[in-house]
Amino acid sequence: MSDYTININGQNDILEKEYSYKLVKMTEPVSVIVTIYNKAKYLDACLSSILNQSYTNLDIILLEDASTDGSLEIAQKYAQKDSRIRLISDGVNHGVSYARNKGIELATSEYITFVDGDDILDVNAIEKMLHAFYEYIIDWAVFGIRTRTDGKDKVYSRASQSKFYLTHDPQFFQSLYLGKQIYSCCAKMYRKSKIVEYFEDFLHLCS
């Protein structure tokens, strides 16, 4: 049984292909864009899951959006102990869309994934997503999602069971990026070049 399926978007149709995960040598960095606003309760688990990824060549960008619950102090603690982390915080609450798109501007990698401050990544999630980009010419990969409850809160966990997409249709890509096809712009890995190509001005598009 394969871990996930490939979905290829061509002439307005979706083809599914079984895909078996095999370890290959991968070297390129992945930019992990983490938006943080009042997520202190979950942030340790979130950031630990990123730092403990089986794929270690990560460009981790923390966008702290003027939290009032101690999230900034937690982000600072992690930034001080891991050189892969860049912490961006100017004390102004800009909103999640601004933060994510600022992350895109700062990303050094062709491969980008978004993480919210209350998400948890499976340990090999990024490795499996990036592997698909190496083996297939795809534009994005979609993580599986599990939900868990903590009191009244719903917390989302990005699982490694996933689907992958290849498309030359800008409208389909835009609808996926904006969350109209699959949940939100989180729980996916993208090619940065495709985001820039398909959006002349992507500011405030991803909320």
Image (cartoon, grey):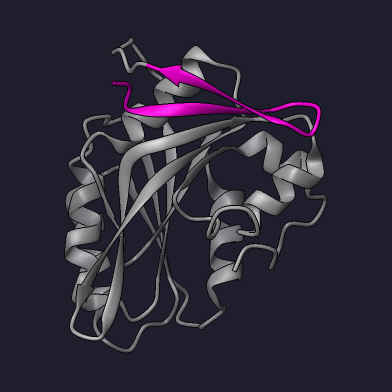
Q: Position of residue 151 (x, y in %)?
A: 18, 84
Residue 175 lies in magenta, yes or no?
no
Q: Within the image, what quadrant is residue 36 found in? A: bottom left
Q: Within the image, what quadrant is residue 119 found in? A: bottom left
Residue at (80% x, 46% y) in the render:
171
Tell me: residue 19, above or below residue 122.
Answer: above
Position of 118 with respect to 185 (left or right) is: left
Residue at (48% x, 13% y) in the render:
135
Q: Which residues are magenta?
A: 1-19
Q: Position of residue 117 (x, y in %)?
A: 33, 66
Q: Position of residue 15 (x, y in %)?
A: 62, 25
Could you say which is closer to the camera, residue 198 or residue 22?
A: 22
Residue at (39% x, 77% y) in the render:
37
How many numbered discs?
0
Q: Quadrant of the C terminus?
A: bottom right
Tell me: residue 106, above or below residue 88.
Answer: above
Residue 7 lies in magenta, yes or no?
yes
Q: Within the image, what quadrant is residue 68 found in? A: bottom left
Q: Position of residue 90 (x, y in %)?
A: 47, 75
Q: Quadrant of the N terminus?
A: top left
Position of 165 with respect to 168 (left or right) is: left
Residue at (80% x, 41% y) in the render:
170
Tell me: residue 43, above or below residue 82.
Answer: below
Secondary structure character of the magenta stretch overall: strand
